Amino acid sequence: MITLGIETSCDETACGVVRNGRVLSNVVSSSVHLHASYGGVVPEIASRYHIEYINAVVKKALRNSRLGFKNLDLIAVTNGPGLCGSLLVGISFAKALSLALSVPILGINHLRAHLFANFIEKNNKNMPRFPFIGLVISGGHTNIFLFKDINDFKVLGNTQDDAVGEAFDKVAKMLKLGYPGGPIIEKSAKRSLHTEIISFPKTYLNKDSLDFSFSGIKTAVLYYIKNKKLTKKMISKISYSFQESVFDVIIEKVLRACEKYKINTVVIGGGVACNKRFHEKIKRAFLSRKISIFIPKVTYCLDNGAMVASLGESLFKKGYSSRMDMSCATDLGSLA
Ligand code: KG4
Ligand code: ZN
């Protein structure tokens, strides 16, 4: 079975081709450079970029897979959550393909695709096992899920304000480091001596809560830098301290979820999961607990079409497909 996956939820125009679980191609064209001077994604610029590039990206993905349109068995497309104008470009393109080629279409939830990126290029022996705790840490979301099966899940925690990636991006903007903030903060933090740490607030909300809030730490950074002339050394110290506090909170919440639901597999996805310091910290925290941690390789952590095709193929094989009147979805609901 051959599936084409289209992803246009934010600032990446992406397309991947998957054959029976194997990625044949994965092409990503990002408009990130066009948003850099604004310190965040400008939705109208992102949609216009998708319109301009989607044709070329899909064609390149097919060319790289050495296949043609006539070989496709399924069109999978991200249908939410994301920027509506951006999503609509991918959805409309996918619908046109589906109609023209007479192949089924399947709308894919972006957050679930991030998690199921952990199943790419895995076999029965080394893939994550259900039930698992899913953690999505991206530019738009911070979520904890309990997955009992591919389409049987519950949202355990959500962000109350800023998403974790958004907090990285905003702090980077305050420190005048550039955009996207995550990789730059990580690099700046590495330069810090790690001996001295600023105690930025760690917001756990109440004792049992699996929700997140990052607006407090963001404001704390803002107050900390107010009226200070920042040196490179100070910026590194702030980056390191911010990163440590944020990751401590996330790891603690994942631990709580594992304990509460007695789960020993954690599956992580989203752009922030690229962060090497996060890998170090979470692996160390879980070392003595016999809990397996899964994080995709960088290509599959960031927005991409292969993860959409891959989850689409697995769901289709279980009997799921979407109707032609499918549109942008804002919820996390199961497929019917
Ligand atoms: O998953 P993603 O590509 O797009 C969304 O679905 O939002 O995530 C993008 C986010 C951005 O906020 C970016 O700053 C963050 O992921 N990010 C990182 C790193 N690389 C990307 N955050 C922390 N450390 C990184 N190395
Ligand atoms: Zn994403």
Image (cartoon, helix red, strand yellow):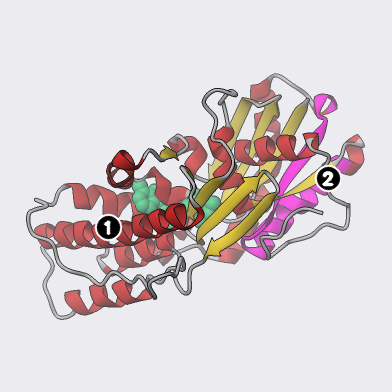
Asked whether the viewer can see residue 283, the reply is: no
- Number of dots carrying numbers: 2
The C terminus, quarter of image:
bottom right
Q: Name the residue under label 2.
A: 321
The amino acid on which the numbered mark 1 sits, given as a three-letter code, is Gln
At horizontal 12% and vertical 52% (from top left) the residue drawn is 194
The amino acid on which the numbered mark 2 sits, given as a three-letter code, is Ser
Q: Answer left or right for 181 relative to 261.
A: left
Secondary structure of the residue carrying numbered label 1? helix
Q: Which callout, 2 or 1, points at the residue further toward the start of the chain? A: 1
Find residue 37 and report its horizontal and vertical position in percent.
40, 62
Snapshot quadrant of residue 222: bottom left
Q: Answer left or right for 247 relative to 85.
A: left
What residue occupies the far top of the structure in this picture? 66
Which of these two is toward me, 330 or 126? 126
Q: Mark 1 points at which residue?
A: 243
Find residue 150 and report its horizontal and vertical position in percent.
67, 43
At horizontal 79% and vertical 52% (from top left) the residue drawn is 92
At horizontal 27% and vertical 64% (from top left) the residue drawn is 176
- State whether label 1 is within 8 Å of ligand 1: yes
Secondary structure of the residue carrying numbered label 2? loop
